[in-house]
Amino acid sequence: MPPLARAARVLDPDMGVLEKLATAWSGIEGRDTWIRGSDCDNMATVKCDADGHVVSIDTTGSLIGASIPEGMSALERLTVLAVRSSGLKGSLPAALFSLPNLKHLVLSGNQLSGSIPSTVGEAERLQTLFLSDNQLSGSLPSSMGSLSALRHLILSNNGLSGSIPESLSNLQKLEYMGMDNNQINGSIPENLGNLQKLTYLQGL
């Protein structure tokens, strides 16, 4: 039997981001295992690929008053960022959506505020965007219509306002869309009804 492959160690650039997160998010689950030189398999709430790049951060904890630090864009192979019900404050960094491999962004149940940045449209591989139960405001950027891979869009229980951009009719893979308990107004784009995979629509 051939020897088992050794678990990859987190590469230095990615480890630098984890260290920054561990400092900023002192109450996050698993941070005490994010130690430079450790194998990724020994790090709780973090997953890596075979080369040592961080591909997933899926955690929760008590982050009252903490925000999403700059520098997340260094995690070039990150596919999952999920931090639920943890008390995160501040705005959504525009650079967060420039992560080229991001597929699932789950930040529900925090205290995030401000508007959804127009750079959201740069996340071309994004399939899941859960930002419900925050304090987001402003209108939905028309650039969201560029999220051609998006399947699940849940923005319920915020303070979002304005009308639904016509560009959302371009989201041909969209299956779930939740907009309830916002201040959305105006008419619903007629072409939204032509999204053949859309099976769940609430709040419009």
Image (cartoon, rainbow, N blue to C red):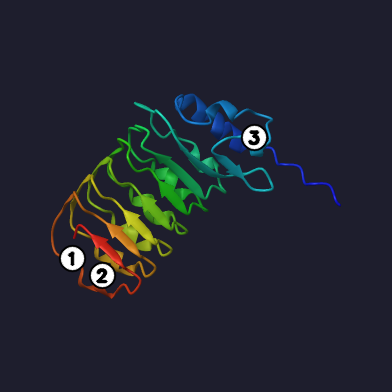
Q: Quadrant of the C terminus?
A: bottom left
Q: Which residue is mark 1?
A: 188
Determine the secondary structure under disc 2.
Answer: helix
Q: Which residue is mark 3?
A: 42
Residue drawn at x 13%, y 60% as measured from the top left = 186
Residue drawn at x 69%, y 48% as measured from the top left = 50
Q: Taking 27 as reference, is 118 left or right?
A: left
Viewer-side label of 1, 3? 3
Determine the secondary structure under disc 1.
Answer: loop
Residue 82: give its label.
none
Q: Which residue is mark 2?
A: 192
Amino acid type of disc 3? Answer: Asn
Viewer-side label of 3, 2? 3
Question: What x and y, as percent, mark residue 145?
Answer: 33, 62
- Depth order, front residue of 99/27: 27
Amino acid type of disc 1? Answer: Ile
Determine the secondary structure under disc 3.
Answer: helix
- Depth order, front residue of 96/89: 89
In the rendered image of this protein, does residue 144 appear above or below residue 89? below
Number of other residues with Cα within 10 Å of mark 3, as a class: few under 14, some 14 to 19, many 20 or more: some
Which callout, 3 or 2, points at the residue further toward the start of the chain? Answer: 3
Amino acid type of disc 2? Answer: Leu
Badge 2 vs badge 1, beta-carbon distance below 8 Å: yes
Report how far apart the C-alphas of labels 3 and 2 lie in the structure: 46 Å
Question: What x and y, as percent, mark residue 151?
Answer: 39, 62
Q: Taking 136 as reference, is 55 left or right?
A: right
Number of other residues with Cα within 10 Å of mark 2, as a class: few under 14, some 14 to 19, many 20 or more: some
